């Protein structure tokens, strides 16, 4: 039907147009775009839920929602952001960038690639449909701790199936990335020549394959506890609620790095370009990522110091956790050293790059504090933790993705984005983010537990401020959507290099790159 | 009730910490910007550890970003700075691997000492068993056979904004946990339905109450007073509405309280027995009528 349309295109372009193009596509660029759009929609959806939370917490007393719905909001906000926004967003970057960066014509397993994406909208629909069931959505926190999850209604079962599907999607995506990186590199693209973004994703893919099945196992055990009479986690039947936490965090801790390592990769691409200097300490960066990934498997119980572990266990998990500060520090220092004596300019991607280094470090340092076991007894499950992980996940992962979007968007679309609006987006995001989350450190230290719909009066001030910041932050993201939309629709033509002499194979291609790229592999000297 | 002074105090404190002028002052404690003033030995140790580590983190933060912002100021293209092309320095890389390790060792030593202290529940003077329920706490004084439930005392109207909120809104209960000062108190924690967590910041006790488990933790309260806390593990709908109120009293007052409780409990078990007999008699009568 579309033959006439594509006849004047190059001979490889025999693909359907319109909606079917997106449903049947096996092209890494199309699939990357789909992932990114999906992630952005989920980001807005999860953000809307966060605003319900912040609206309720704006003032003491119950005003907006009832406590059960509040718990559904905290739970689904987290699930949507983690599994719907950040992870798929990073996969979107991987799809677009990895083949371009290693000089491959496409991902190694293109049909699998299509399937990994198209599982996601169904999984998300399943998760959202839980709100329509009798008991509402899952309300036990994204950590799904038993036995509370065993009490939930059918919404929990839908969540479990959604998690299964998301897990399948992630593992397939990860397999694809590993196979691509191992087999599709252009001649001369040795492992130690790969851009750091490719390295971080390669290591992340191994993490995904290692831990997503563990999570799937944990939720399946929950499912059988709920419906088939097993008692893995139910003490009444001889089960062990703490076992669930061990299994969950064996997945959950590497999961944190699954979300942050590709962000490190994006930052490591942005900072050298705008410093006009090569990345400082490439080898130690790769080793640091590998080190962080390895350590991520052996520190999980630092999320559960208060469950009552033996003393030696607590000491071990404290020391192992503190060790993570070393490779993480190496990365921060290397980024600063990359900027040092460069020739810096501050286009929007660089603003995000510097902003992420600065704000992520706050989250890293509060993470170090949380790793100190005796002090963690006071911080645990308070707003101090909420502040910490938002500094890591929002001003780490999410803002790195925004920076990455501005960095590669001219390449992807062939148009420059609106620089002025981009800068506005950066400053508003950073300022509102800090207004929303910095005061939460004070709340946590002063004793406000997380996941409560109402609070004692001494917590009023910072909750008011935090809510104002959150609404500002949420609204600002609509601007982001507008900037990207505007850039897709038109704008100043981008050159193939886009920036001032950036490093990497993607910049040797025209902007936008043709539908099929590197059909004859480039030779990397 | 929005106190602007508190917000200003927060800004000054953050600024003071970052400029190393005054890491933690009385202002900080007064406005509740840091961990609350502790009243137990472990509480003091934790606060000291926390302040110390936070200070080190602030120093690292300031040092790293002083370098970064200097670089951003000086090494920019608009100032005509030419990029040098160095891409590694073995010395620097070893330096910023080794120095953090040393700093971490410096943090780990006091942390380990405190941790060992925290976990030593031996030789307690008094044992209180705490059981979490959805959504209230049960306290059992093992040495005296005293036991009672403690529920949120804040009226519904205050929560629903139909009445003015009291001073201890959401942090008030019908029955306080009365404890003697200067005694080593051991808590045994468990739960009856889902996981809860018993937390009172000032006495530095937070431990999960898990069904099927009995956890241990201890404290020694140095000052008489009322200390308030909350459940900190999401436990369902009313997780935000199961506070903890500890009332620390002198030994004599504590003994008197125990004696009163014991007497009350005996009286109520007699009442219950009578109630039981009455209903038994009724049952028999009903049976006879048939
Ligand atoms: Cu509870």
Image (spheres, coloured by chain):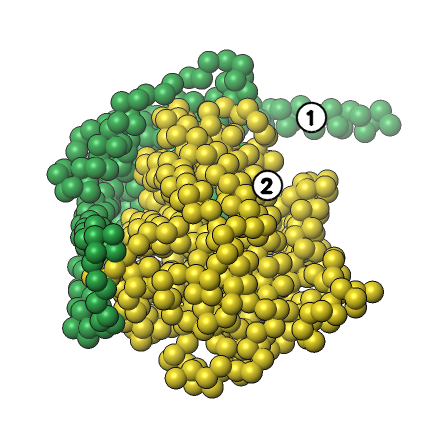
Q: Is label 2 or label 1 in front? A: 2
The secondary element bearing badge 1 is classed as: helix
Whether pointer 2 and pointer 1 mark residues with C-beta atoms closer than 8 Å, the reply is: no
* Distance Cα–Cα, label 2 vs label 1: 44 Å
- The structure residue drawn at horizontal position 19% and vertical position 40%, both measured from the top left corner, is B17
Q: Is residue A488 visible?
A: yes
Q: Which residue is mark 2?
A: A72
Closest to the observer, A337 or B4: A337
Q: Nearer the viewer, residue A482 or A375?
A: A482
- Taking the view exactly as shown, the residue that stands out farthest to the right is B290
Q: Is the C-beta of the residue carrying label 1 under 8 Å from the nearest atom of ligand 1? A: no
- Residue under pointer 1: B279
Nearest the camera: B144 or A97? A97
As drawn, the residue found furthest toward the left would be B21
Residue B202 pos. (x, y %): 29, 36
In the image: residue A353, left or right of residue A122? left
Q: Secondary structure at mark 2?
A: helix
What is the x, y in percent for residue A158? Answer: 69, 52
Residue occupying the point 57% across, 27% down? A64
Output the chain of dot 1. B
Quadrant showing the C terminus of chain A: bottom left
Q: Residue placed at 28% from the left, 38% from the top? A: B35
| A60, A118: nearer the viewer | A118
Mark 1 packing: few (<14 Cα in 10 Å), some, or many (20+)? few
Can you say whether B37 is above or below A490 in the image? above
Up the image or down, A241 lies above or below B168; here it is below
Q: Which quadrant does the N terminus of chain A fall into?
A: bottom right
Of all residues, the one furthest to the front in this rendering is A8
**Chain B colour as displayed:** green
């Amino acid at each position: 039907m579309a033959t006439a349309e594509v006849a004047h295109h190059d001979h490889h372009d025999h693909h359907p147009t319109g909606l079917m193009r997106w449903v049947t596509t096996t092209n890494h660029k199309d699939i990357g775009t789909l992932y990114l759009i999906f992630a952005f929609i989920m980001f807005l959806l999860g953000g809307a839920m966060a605003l319900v939370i912040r609206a309720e917490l704006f003032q003491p007393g119950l005003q907006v929602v009832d406590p059960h719905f509040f718990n559904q909001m905290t739970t689904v906000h987290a699930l949507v952001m983690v599994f719907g926004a950040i992870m798929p967003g990073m996969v979107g970057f991987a799809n677009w960038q990895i083949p371009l960066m290693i000089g491959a014509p496409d991902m190694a397993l293109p049909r699998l690639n299509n399937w990994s994406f198209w599982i996601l909208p169904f999984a998300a629909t399943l998760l959202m449909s839980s709100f329509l069931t009798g008991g509402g959505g899952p309300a036990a926190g994204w950590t799904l701790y038993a036995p509370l999850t065993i009490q939930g209604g059918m919404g929990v079962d839908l969540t479990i199936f959604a998690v299964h599907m998301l897990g399948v999607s992630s593992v397939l995506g990860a397999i694809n990335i590993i196979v691509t990186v191992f087999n599709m590199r252009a001649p001369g693209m040795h492992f130690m020549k790969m851009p750091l973004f490719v390295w971080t994703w390669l290591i992340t893919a191994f993490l995904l394959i290692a831990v997503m099945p563990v999570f799937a196992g944990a939720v399946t055990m929950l499912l059988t506890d709920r419906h088939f009479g097993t008692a893995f986690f139910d003490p009444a039947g001889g089960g062990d609620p703490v076992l669930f936490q061990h299994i969950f965090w064996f997945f959950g801790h590497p999961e944190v790095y699954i979300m942050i390592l590709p962000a490190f990769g994006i930052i490591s691409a942005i900072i050298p370009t705008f410093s006009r200097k090569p990345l400082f300490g490439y080898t130690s960066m790769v080793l640091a990522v590998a080190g962080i990934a390895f350590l991520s498997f052996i520190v999980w119980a630092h999320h559960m110091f208060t469950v009552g572990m033996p003393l030696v266990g607590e000491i071990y998990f404290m020391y192992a956790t503190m060790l993570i500060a070393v490779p993480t520090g190496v990365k921060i220092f290397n980024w600063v050293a990359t900027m040092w004596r460069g020739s810096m300019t501050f286009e929007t991607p660089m603003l995000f790059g510097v902003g992420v280094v600065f704000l992520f470090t706050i989250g890293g340092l509060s993470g170090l504090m949380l790793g100190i076991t005796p002090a963690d007894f006071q911080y645990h499950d308070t707003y101090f933790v909420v502040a910490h992980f938002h500094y890591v996940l929002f001003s780490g992962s999410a803002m790195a993705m925004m920076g990455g979007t501005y960095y590669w968007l001219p390449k992807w679309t062939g148009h420059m984005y609106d620089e002025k609006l981009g800068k506005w987006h950066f400053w508003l995001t950073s300022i509102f983010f800090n207004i929303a989350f910095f005061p939460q450190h004070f709340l946590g230290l002063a004793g406000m537990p997380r996941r409560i719909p109402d609070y004692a009066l001494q917590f009023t001030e910072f909750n008011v401020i935090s809510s104002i910041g959150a609404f500002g932050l949420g609204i600002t993201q609509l601007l982001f959507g507008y900037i990207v939309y505007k850039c897709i629709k038109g704008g100043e033509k981008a050159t193939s290099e886009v920036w001032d002499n950036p490093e990497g194979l993607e910049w040797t291609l025209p902007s936008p790159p043709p539908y099929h790229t590197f059909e004859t592999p480039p030779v990397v000297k | 009730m929005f106190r602007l002074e508190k917000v200003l105090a927060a800004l000054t404190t953050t600024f003071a910490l970052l400029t190393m002028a005054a890491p933690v002052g009385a202002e900080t404690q007064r406005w509740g910007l840091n961990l609350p003033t502790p009243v137990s030995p472990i509480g003091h140790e934790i606060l000291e550890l926390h302040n110390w580590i936070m200070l080190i983190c602030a120093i690292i933060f300031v040092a790293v970003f002083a370098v970064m912002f200097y670089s951003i100021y000086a090494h920019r293209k608009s100032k005509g700075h030419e990029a040098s092309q160095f891409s590694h320095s073995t010395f620097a890389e070893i330096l910023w691997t080794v120095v953090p390790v040393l700093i971490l060792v410096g943090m780990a030593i006091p942390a380990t000492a405190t941790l060992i202290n925290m976990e030593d529940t031996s030789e307690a003077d008094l044992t209180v068993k705490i059981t979490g329920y959805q959504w209230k706490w049960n306290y059992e004084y093992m040495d005296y056979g005293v036991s009672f439930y403690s529920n949120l005392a804040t009226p519904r109207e205050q929560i629903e904004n139909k009445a003015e909120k009291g001073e201890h809104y959401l942090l008030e209960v019908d029955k306080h946990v009365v404890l003697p000062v200067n005694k080593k108190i051991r808590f045994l924690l468990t739960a009856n339905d889902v996981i809860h967590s018993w937390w009172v910041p000032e006495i530095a006790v937070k431990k999960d109450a898990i069904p099927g488990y009995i956890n241990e933790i201890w404290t020694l309260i140095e000052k008489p007073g009322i200390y308030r806390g909350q459940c900190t593990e999401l436990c369902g709908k009313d997780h935000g509405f199961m506070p903890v109120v500890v009332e620390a009293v002198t030994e004599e007052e504590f003994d008197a309280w125990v004696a009163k409780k014991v007497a009350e409990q005996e009286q109520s078990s007699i009442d219950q027995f009578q109630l039981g007999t009455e209903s038994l008699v009724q049952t028999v009568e009903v049976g006879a009528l048939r």
